[in-house]
Image (spheres, helix red, strand yellow):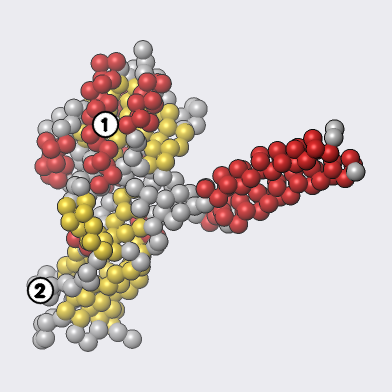
Amino acid sequence: MSKLSTVLVIGACLLAAAGGYGLSQLQHGGEEHAHGETPSTQKPGTTAAAPSESLPTGIALSDLDGHKYSLDDYKGKLMIVNFWATWCAPCLNEIPILVKMQERYGAKGFQLIGPAVDDIEEARRAAPGLKFNYPVAVGTPEDMLELMSTLGNDQGGLPFSVVIAPDGRIIERQLGEYSEVELAGLIEKYLPH
Amino acid sequence: MTLHARLASLLLACAIALPAVAIEFSRKPQAGSADALLSADAAFRLVSVIRDQDAILVNWMIEPGYYLYRQRIAVEAVEAGISLGKPVLPKGIAEHDEHFGDVEIYKTAVELRLPLKAGAPVPTQLRLRWQGCAEAGVCYPPVTRVVDVSPAS
């Protein structure tokens, strides 16, 4: 009887494990297979960067008034480059949170940059209402899509954010909105001091 | 170990395994919201641009979990001097957007009908523009394409 009980326990565990694996395969259709078919797909949500991945140097931008600046100017700060556009409702939802973060953490070594994947005039028209308290970057939509691709987003989906540590290392990328709680936690974790 | 203890172990094993299975269920990919975010071209497929007797018909297929904005579908003739009739789009799904106000969106499919004016020159190419989003909370840049108009088969 005791042997039978032992066999029952082991058998239940094996069945549970096999069942879980089988369900997983049914639901994902075989993850490796699916990923193999669509290697360029991106996932909404956060993707951690490789430990050694750094922000490329020499990325030049132009603000709403035509003044030139570079992402290199902000080295030493925790930086988030947040791509947005006037045609992107999730971006417009997220910007007030970003403005709040800049206000709260700007004096503590945090810097947001907001490249607009948009016609320059559309971005200029929308900017006052969005109350940016951080630099917005404008250019042709094609230039901005190319910049976004350089920073790891080939599909052009927005909003898209890249989080860069004070030493220039890329920490993570986010496709889709950050919540206020997520963003505050992230900033506090990586602030330089 | 007593029989009761072994039965308790069995229950414990199930208690551990079942939540793991439940987590797997909760991770089931939702179209447009989980593992595979499609490219704009795959999410919104322009499938045909066909000249009918009195109109040009443009058809898009839209993948589940994605939508096109009615207000952001536009068409113009590529050739100079051709004036097009007013494009006709079906009524979409009405939504109220905090930023854009009242909008209409299309899911699944949409057909744009471009009436041809009697006796007027017919365009051989159109410049089409459209823009949409994934329900997962990601939007795609406007797409512009120049396409040939095929005669009806």
Looking at the picture, tell me which residue is in the foreground, A180 or A186: A180
Q: Kindly state the secondary structure of the residue where label 2 is placed.
A: loop
Residue under the point 55% across and 50% down: B25
Q: Label 2 belongs to which residue?
A: B83
Chain assignment, label 2: B
Give the distance between the C-alpha atoms of the residues marked 2 and 1, in whole angstroms: 45 Å
Q: Kindly state the secondary structure of the residue where label 1 is placed.
A: helix
Look at label 1 and name its amino acid. Answer: Leu
Q: Label 1 belongs to which residue?
A: A98
Q: Nearer the viewer, mark 2 or mark 1?
A: 1
Against B34, residue B62 (above or below) is: below
Looking at the picture, tell me which residue is in the foreground, A40 or A128: A128
Can residue A39 be seen by looking at this rendering? no
Position of B6 compared to B40: left or right? right
Exactly how many numbered labels are in the figure? Answer: 2
Q: Residues within 10 Å of mark 2 (few under 14, many from 20)?
A: some
Looking at the picture, tell me which residue is in the foreground, A172 or B32: B32
Viewport quadrant of the N terminus of chain A: top right
Look at label 2 and name its amino acid. Answer: Ser
Q: Position of residue A180 (x, y in %)?
A: 32, 31
Q: Quadrant of residue B129?
A: bottom left
Q: Position of residue A116 (x, y in %)?
A: 23, 40
Against B125, residue B144 (above or below) is: above
